[in-house]
Amino acid sequence: MKKKKLLFGATAVATTIATEVTAQADSVNDNATANVAQVSVQSPTKTAENKVATADKAVADAQTSVDQAQTNFDTAQKNLADANTNKTTADSQVEAKKSEVSTAKDAVDTAQKALDTKGSKAELDQAQTDFDSAKSAQANAQKDLTEKQTAKENADKAVVPAKEDLATAKDTQSLLQEAVDHAKSKQQAQANVVTDLQNKLNQANQTATKTNVQIHVTNELKQAVQKYVNDVYANADKTTLNNDAKAIQDALTNPKKYGFPHTDITGSGSNSKIETKNNGGPLSINYIPSSEDEELMEQHNNHPLYASSKQLVGNLTNKQLLELEQFTADIINAMRDALGISDKVGHVIVNQDAINIANQLGKNEVATTNANITKDVANKYGLDYSKLRNELLIDRYGFFFNFVAQSLPWKMSYVKGMLAYNLNEYISLGILLPNGQTVTDRNGNPLYDHDLVGLESKSLLGITPNLIKQAKNNTNKDQYFGWSHPDFPNRKNDINVSTRFIFIPQSMITDKSKFDQTPLFQNTTNDTTALRSEFDQATSRLQSLTNTLTQAQVKLDTANAQVKTAQTAYDQALKQQTNADQALATAKTALQTADQNLATAQTKLDSAKQAYADSLKDTATKQEALKQAQTTLAQK
């Protein structure tokens, strides 16, 4: 590389010189032309040639110096390589000599020991013991290594299926999660359909009354009542129905105020007024009087300006009594609609024969002490005596129903307002037996699914065991209805009397020629048969989808558990594999150490054997051997 650079430099110099020469030549020609004197000058070309020759010589001399330097460098490199080779040879010879010295020392030690037969024997015995121990340790190390190799192979084999099981479990989990998501989506969509149909059904079931009655119920009560009715239809066991009935009682007697509007009458005389208060309980009835209800009744012309509730009710005309009967029926039907059970328990239909029966049976103990009255009524109106008597057994004394005793204006609004208020109270409180009494079975366990428990509330709602079973077994689920109060004008001369509500299902009528089934008022409810059918189908599909979702969730939960188990097994397999790797490496190291120890022990044993053998020779021979060994050591 240096030669090439130098030559390139010479060429550059030559080129530069040539350029200078050309420039000088041009200058000489110009001068020659200008100078008229004949002056003898040296040729510029010759001068340039001399300079080039001088430059070429300088290049050649430089190249010679480079070549000589390269030769010197190559010689130095060879001398260094030879020196390194000589050093390696010398180092090897030194090591060999050191080994020879060590061997000579061992020979001296052996020769010295040979002079001591007893000591040599002791060392031989110890060497043999050490050798045996080393051999045993080496055998154990070899055995341990074999076991660790087997454990490693087994650990390696266990990882593969554990990994495959985990992958399979995760695949299954993923598929089942998709199934749950899909089922949940369909179930939610169907739930929305059911909710929409329920709202439409509730709207269709609202009874069209001219007196504007509003019913409000809590979801807790609604769900409890619907569950009980549905379970009766499904022939649920006694325990289930008893629990359902208790849930109704708990929902009705919950003291919490829900802010529902309900009717209340406050004040007296000129200060009396019908109010709507917003602190209703689980079921609230709110009556908003019509303009007709607010008009003064014609009776006020013959009586003082204000009257007691007993006077108001006791002077009602037949037309007003029938209006009150229908008003009561409207409230009952509206309550059943609000609870969403009208399709299963029916509505009540005001009927003159039912009103007559309520008047005639408005006495105490008509199912027991005065049972002959009930039998006469059953024969007169073509009714099943046993079924009528069963209903009366439920309500042996009739409803304990009293109007408020305050001074009120002569208006139907106050009569209806008192009725709405009392029905509201009896729905909320009538679920309980008087004085905190309970009905129990033979073992003393409380019974809630019993006709005597909550008779007022359950009768009005149509969910006494007696009424609901008859509704279940009949296509036409409506009941003919009438009620009577001791303060009514046609009851003034009765003794031992009570309020009586009468519900007569179709199944109670045995002779239709005796019982006039003509309604006194046109049924104001809408026909919801088609809508109810659609709702039932939607509810059935929702239940099916809910079951599918539940089953899918159960499978997913199982898959999740399996993934967790598989992950644990895989992690454990990896851990065992790592432990096996480490144990194998340790066993290999232990075997190498045992092999080295065994080799050392073997060497010592061989030396001890030789020393002991030498110690058995005669003393002169052993001394000669020692002397020879010492001489050799000195030489080495």
Image (cartoon, helix red, strand yellow):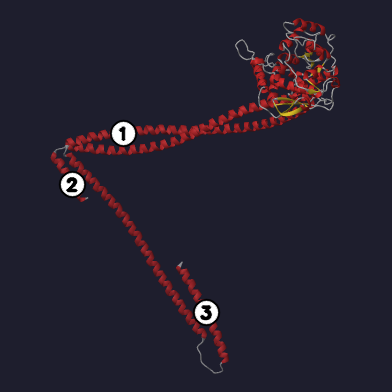
Residue 466 horizontal/vertical position (percent): 72, 13
User: Can you name the residue that lies furthest to the top here?
Assistant: 372
State the image quarter where residue 307 is shown: top right
In space, the residues marked 1 and 2 are separated at their CA atoms by: 34 Å
Q: Residue at x 75, y 21 (%)?
A: 406
Asked if disc 1 and disc 3 are in contact, CB closer than 8 Å, the reply is: no
Could you tell me which secondary element the residue under label 1 belongs to? helix
| Residue 183 lies in quadrant | top right
Is residue 365 placed above or below 544 in the rendered structure? above
Q: Classify residue 481 as left or right of residue 587.
A: right
Q: Nearer the viewer, mark 1 or mark 2?
A: 1
Residue 630 is labelled as 2
Quadrant in the picture for residue 68? bottom left
How far, Cα to Cα, is label 2 from label 3? 87 Å
The percent position of residue 281, horizontal first and vertical second, equals 69, 25
Q: Is residue 525 above or below residue 61?
A: above
Nearest the eye: 562 or 469: 469
- Amino acid type, label 3: Ala
Please tell me whether residue 38 is drawn above or below residue 403 in the rendered image.
below
| SS label for mark 2 | helix
User: Any mark on residue 479, and which?
Assistant: none
Mark closest to the chain's N terminus, 2 or 3: 3
Residue position for label 1: 135
- To which residue does mark 3 refer? 18
Amino acid type indicated by mark 1 = Lys
Is there any visible trace of residue 199 in the rendered image?
A: yes
Mark pair 1, 3: CA separation:
93 Å
Q: Mark 1 or mark 3: which is in front?
A: 1
Q: Earlier in the sequence, mark 1 or mark 2?
A: 1
Q: Amino acid at mark 2?
A: Gln
